[in-house]
Image (tube, grey):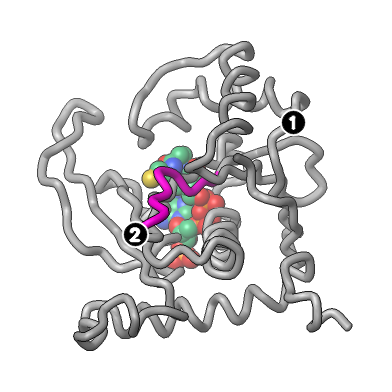
Amino acid sequence: MFGAQFTIENDLKITMRPFRDSDVLGLAQGFSSYKVRHYLRSISGVSEEFERDWIQKIEKSTNEIVWAIVPGQEENAKGCISINSIDDSARSGTVGIAIFDPAWWGQGVATTTHTALLYYASTVWNLWTLSATVYEPNLPSARALLKNGYVEVGRLHQSEFRDGHLADVRIFQWINPYHAEMIFHPNPIPELFTEAVQLSHQRLQEIAKIIPDLLPLERKI
Ligand SMILES: CC(C)(COP(=O)(O)OP(=O)(O)OC[C@H]1O[C@@H](n2cnc3c(N)ncnc32)[C@H](O)[C@@H]1OP(=O)(O)O)[C@@H](O)C(=O)NCCC(=O)NCCS
């Protein structure tokens, strides 16, 4: 499924919304670029037809939530962020992101949309833990996770072939700060997570102020 539409009212004014037909060309061009695919799981090119089918497939899926990222004054999507493999019983999922127009890299789009995704995961979907994997050299991707209260919990050594050699994959996990004590009950929150849980709580409180579309209804009155 697609996530509901909302706008983050920061300097960039980023809208997260379902994908549309008008996004297909940008999706196909972006996800065919080696520069963009470089750190994604599979490196391949894709056609517009593939992307049109993909939009329909996502619409019908029930265990993933996907958004188009539309920053600034853009009309069409420049990125994609998602929660995949949602497990209803464990309240868990995995997270992925690609800003598929490199002109938008390095402007905070990934960091901010990750925060918005965590806010949605907490307040709309009641997810308790999320995880993400990042190829070792992909520093921007790791930074965007760490700044949102993800913790690096391990790595798969020499497990992916990139740029002519085997690279490690870093594994990150986020704990929902509103349920952290319950998640680890009867044990205390492990020291590994204590600072990150506080950081995530702080960021969720901050982003709530700039996503008026997602504020609880009574707080709008
Ligand atoms: C990885 C990606 C999502 C980052 O998106 P972004 O919007 O450029 O990220 P942000 O602007 O929020 O930057 C995140 C952090 O990375 C840093 N960063 C950005 N470009 C960098 C670079 N070339 N080298 C090192 N750090 C960099 C930023 O400074 C920021 O850290 P800081 O706040 O401590 O300064 C984007 O580059 C992308 O889509 N790449 C292709 C697909 C991909 O790799 N997806 C992730 C798979 S795990």
What crowding class fits label 1: few (fewer than 14 Cα within 10 Å), some (14-19), or many (20 or more)?
few
Q: Position of residue 185 (x, y in %)?
A: 26, 83
Residue 75 versus residue 91: which sits nearer the camera?
91
Look at the image and say whether residue 54 sits in the magenta stretch.
no
Residue 189 versus residue 139: which sits nearer the camera?
189
Disc nearest the viewer among 1 and 2? 2
Q: Residue at x 57, y 12 (%)?
A: 47
Q: Quadrant of residue 6?
A: bottom right
- Residue 110's tag is none
Q: Residue at x 60, y 64 (%)?
A: 124
**Mark 2: which secondary structure?**
loop
Q: Decide: marks 1, 2 in contact (CB < 8 A)? A: no
Q: Main secondary structure of the magenta part?
A: strand
Q: Position of residue 94 (x, y in %)?
A: 38, 50
Q: Residue at x 45, y 69 (%)?
A: 148
Magenta residues, start to end: 81-89
Q: Amino acid at mark 1?
A: Arg
Q: Residue at x 14, y 34 (%)?
A: 166
Location of residue 91 with respect to 209 vertically, above or below: above
Q: Quadrant of residue 213?
A: bottom right
Location of residue 81 with respect to 60 vertically, above or below: below
| Left or right of 195, for residue 121 | right
Location of residue 178 with respect to 75 vertically, above or below: below
- Residue 90's tag is 2
| Left or right of 39, for residue 55 | right
The quarter of the rendered structure image containing the N terminus is: top right
